[in-house]
Amino acid sequence: MTDDYTDVTGYYSTHFPQPHPPYVREAPAYFTRNGLHYLITSGTTGYAPNPSEVAVARTYHGPWTVLGDPHPGDASRTSHRSQISSVFKHPHKKNLYIALADRWLPHLAPELAQPIRQEMRRRYADPTEDASDTPIALPEELINPDTSIADYVWLPLRFEGEMAFVDWHDEWRIEDYD
């Protein structure tokens, strides 16, 4: 944008160019820490949660380096059945960053996510295939989702070097952090 926000300058950056879903990234949760720029993103699988990715860069426009899944302890590979939408630093704590994640369909069984990711890979693997000829059988919950039942997950981030992790905690307290 121009300085007066009335036009574009023509300068832009592309982050994580990928060929097709589910590899395309969405829902970027951006934050900075110790002079580094972070993005935690999600794959594109509709309302079925999928693994998140953490990427880091020295500048906002990159280049970005993908560091991996911030949820290594999540056996379901669904980012704790959620999609991170925001990360913020607690204003009164030295190093407490908190991830806010949406749980669009809280009762969705985690095992539904993997077949959806596999189906998306299959459909996009052969660009000559007409996906409309082989419709995927989705549960009603994903065809007509009721997102009014969505809830949220709030979890602290843990850092090892540049890598940010979002571990599951059944319970945690802000008071337990410096």
Image (cartoon, helix red, strand yellow):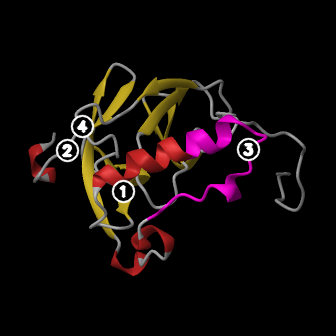
Q: Position of residue 36 (x, y in %)?
A: 50, 28
Callout 1–callout 3 Cβ contact below 8 Å: no
Who is closer to the viewer here, 148 or 158?
148
Can the viewer see residue 71 in this picture?
yes
At 76% from the left and 39% from the top, the residue drawn is 127
Q: Residue at x 50, y 71 (%)?
A: 143
Please report the residue visible at 64 percent of the width from the left and 33 percent of the height from the top.
Answer: 16
Q: Which residue is mark 2?
A: 168
Report helix, strand or loop for mark 1.
Answer: strand
| Three-letter residue code for mark 2 | Trp
**What residue is pinned by disc 3?**
129
Question: Which residue is under mark 4?
Answer: 75
Residue 28 appears left or right of 134: left
Percent coordinates x, y for residue 149 in the rendering: 33, 78
Horizontal placement of 34 versus 122: left or right? left
Mark toward the start of the polypeptide (4 vs 2): 4
Where's residue 167, x and y in %? 22, 39
Which callout, 3 or 2, points at the residue further toward the start of the chain? 3
Give the alpha-carbon distance from disc 4 to disc 2, as whole Å: 11 Å
Dot 4: within a 10 Å radius of its alpha carbon, few (fewer than 14), some, or many (20 or more) residues?
Answer: few
Q: Report, in whole angstroms, how far the alpha carbon at label 3 lies from the one at label 4.
A: 32 Å
Residue 78: x and y, percent?
A: 34, 46
Label 1, label 4: how far apart the Cα atoms are:
18 Å
Residue type, mark 4 in image: Ala
Rendered image quadrant of residue 52: top left
Dot 2 falls on a residue whose secondary structure is loop
